[in-house]
């Protein structure tokens, strides 16, 4: 197949661009235009392999003289005109030149063939088809016309003075071929039935109709098949198309442009940037996923665990043991291994509603400015498996490094001081017990009893040790809570980072990829239709 004009994209490049658009569409869009374009690509591949013969089809309504014109061009009565015409819905073919074009006609599924032996050499390479009447009462005839109209290289539409302005012909066949004006010829047959002024008026009216339908580049030829008027001009037009050896290329290029034009309705070249990665959208979605994943529960457990640990080190030793009666809040969650499920509670109705709303906002942000077909695709992309998303989030939270579980130095120091105060109180208590024993033995006067400001030293050691320990525990408590909150904030940042990775991989990434495919689709469609 030869290339297109220098000023245009070559047919090979045009079809490659259309193929890229179809490949993207097949993965993303559920639209009939993609199936039509895929059919065209299959047709192009088959047509390129069948040589550069020019297939011209004569199409028209009953009584337009199409078959008579076909016989006149063929030089013999190949197709029976009038009421004796077969009604099997099978086209006839006349072939010029030594090559019988059998493979091409097999592909076209045209079994009735005639070799024009003493034809015009200028028409060598022409395969002329006489199609069934497009307005036949038989459905199979009309379907055959529609099938072959899509496959031939040049379409010659035969009209007659009585029905040349028929709305059905123009709306169903001619107007839709506005993009194929270069591979279309309109013949006004049977002009011998009109006088010269009427023929001129009829031709002018037909020309105006075609121009308004976007077919200004389509030639209009008057003919009279019975008298031979206009046949030399029609043969010359067909000879020009055959000699150029580019009718098939032009038809495929026109088809590719039409297919690209149909796909272009699903394009929005000025859709604007992807809003799903805006900071506010990202933060809102990550927060919603974090809530659904149980991040608040983990952060709360980390803070309570840090308080518990701090109280164990800085609390009043007299009551410190009671903290061990309660299990570690963080340990109950079974975090630290991505291989196992955590014991986090499932997301509640509020968290689920927030997650659904956030996913919808992300989808709408990604689809802003896109055609409906792509918004539907983004909706399908955003319909994530709740089980998969929940599992990814749980593994992300479970496997997050919550940081080193080290006891701060100041807590160790306070803990050491608390034990020193306990030993002090214990020394005072033992001293007092010793004094009680000496009193029972009536030896209390033997051992002098030191006093401080009139208070016995053992009593001062006991009471001072206990009260100082209690006061130190109370003073350390706010510091423990502040440290626990600080650690909880650090853990929350780490958890949000991991949830953010899941957000990107499972939600925003696929949405962005779909939007990038839209851009790639539009670029390919633009190239194919240029």
Image: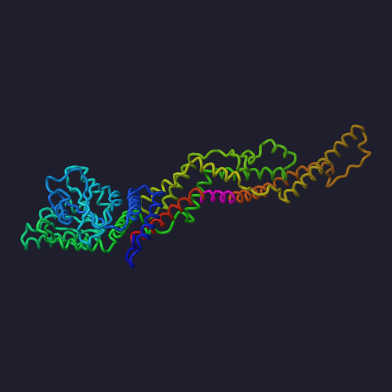
What secondary structure predominates along the stretch shown in magenta?
helix
Residue at the top extreme? 440
Across and down, in percent, residue 90 comes to: 22, 46
In x, y percent, where is residue 159? 15, 55
Q: In this view, does 25 lie to the left or right of 210?
A: right
Q: Position of residue 182 (x, y in %)?
A: 25, 61
Quadrant of the image for the N terminus? bottom left
> For the point 80% across and 45% down, which residue is it?
420
Check the image and report above or below for 5 versus 23: below
Asked if residue 79 is among those painted magenta in the image, a careful observer would answer no
Q: Nearer the viewer, residue 352 or 165?
A: 165
Q: Where is residue 73 in the image (x, y as percent from the top left)?
A: 17, 57
Q: Nearer the viewer, residue 28 or 207?
A: 207
Q: Which of 343 and 98 is in front in this view?
A: 98
Tell me which segment is drawn in magenta: 493-504
Q: Is residue 502 magenta?
A: yes
Q: Is residue 284 left or right of residue 437?
A: left
Q: How is the image coloured?
A: rainbow
Please, which residue is most extreme toward the bottom here? 7
Is 12 left or right of 86, judged from the image as shown? right
If the image is split into quadrants, where does the C terminus sit?
Answer: bottom left
Q: Toward which corner of the image does residue 339 lie, by quadrant?
A: top right
Q: Residue at x 54, y 44 (%)?
A: 392
């Amino acid at each position: 197949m030869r290339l297109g004009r220098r000023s245009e994209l070559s047919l090979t490049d045009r079809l490659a661009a259309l193929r890229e658009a179809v490949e993207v569409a097949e993965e993303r869009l559920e639209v009939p235009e993609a199936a039509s374009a895929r059919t065209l690509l299959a047709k192009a591949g088959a047509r390129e392999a069948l040589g550069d013969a020019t297939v011209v089809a004569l199409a028209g309504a009953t009584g337009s003289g199409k078959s008579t014109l076909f016989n006149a061009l063929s030089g013999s009565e190949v197709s029976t005109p009038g009421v004796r015409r077969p009604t099997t819905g099978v086209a006839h073919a006349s072939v010029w030149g030594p090559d019988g074009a059998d493979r091409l006609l097999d592909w076209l599924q045209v079994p009735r063939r005639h070799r024009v032996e003493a034809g015009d050499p200028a028409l060598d390479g022409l395969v002329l088809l006489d199609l069934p009447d497009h307005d036949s009462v038989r459905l199979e005839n009309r379907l055959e016309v529609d099938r072959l109209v899509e496959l031939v290289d040049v379409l010659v539409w035969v009209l007659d003075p009585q029905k040349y302005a028929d709305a059905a012909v123009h709306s169903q066949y001619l107007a839709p071929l506005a993009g194929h004006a270069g591979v279309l010829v309109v013949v006004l047959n049977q002009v011998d039935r009109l006088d010269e002024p009427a023929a001129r008026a009829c031709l002018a009216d037909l020309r105006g109709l075609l121009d308004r339908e976007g077919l200004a580049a389509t030639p209009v030829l008057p003919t009279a098949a019975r008298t031979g008027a206009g046949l030399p001009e029609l043969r010359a037009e067909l000879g020009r198309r055959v000699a150029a050896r580019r009718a098939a290329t032009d038809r495929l290029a026109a088809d590719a442009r039409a297919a690209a034009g149909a796909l272009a309705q699903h394009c929005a070249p000025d859709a604007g940037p992807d809003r799903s990665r805006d900071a506010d959208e990202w933060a809102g979605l990550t927060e919603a996923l974090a809530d659904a994943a149980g991040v608040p529960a983990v952060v709360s457990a980390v803070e309570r665990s840090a308080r518990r640990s701090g109280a164990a080190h800085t609390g009043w030793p007299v009551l410190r043991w009671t903290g061990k009666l309660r299990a570690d809040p963080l340990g109950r969650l079974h975090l630290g291994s991505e291989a196992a499920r955590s014991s986090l509670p499932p997301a509640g109705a509020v968290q689920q509603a927030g997650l659904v709303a956030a996913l919808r906002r992300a989808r709408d942000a990604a689809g802003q400015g896109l055609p409906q077909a792509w918004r539907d695709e983004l909706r399908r992309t955003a319909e994530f498996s709740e089980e998969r998303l929940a599992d990814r989030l749980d593994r992300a939270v479970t496997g997050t490094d919550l940081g080193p579980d080290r006891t701060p130095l100041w807590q160790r120091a306070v803990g050491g001081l608390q034990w020193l105060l306990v030993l002090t109180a214990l020394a005072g208590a033992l001293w007092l017990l010793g004094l009680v024993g000496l009193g029972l033995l009536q030896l209390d006067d033997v051992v002098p009893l030191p006093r401080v400001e009139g208070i016995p030293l053992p009593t001062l050691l006991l009471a001072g040790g206990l009260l100082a320990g209690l006061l130190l525990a109370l003073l350390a408590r706010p510091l423990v809570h502040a440290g626990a909150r600080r650690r909880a904030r650090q853990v929350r940042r780490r958890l949000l980072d991991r949830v953010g990775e899941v957000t990107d991989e499972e939600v925003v990434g696929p949405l962005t990829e779909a939007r990038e495919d839209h851009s790639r689709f539009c670029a390919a469609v633009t190239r194919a239709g240029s």
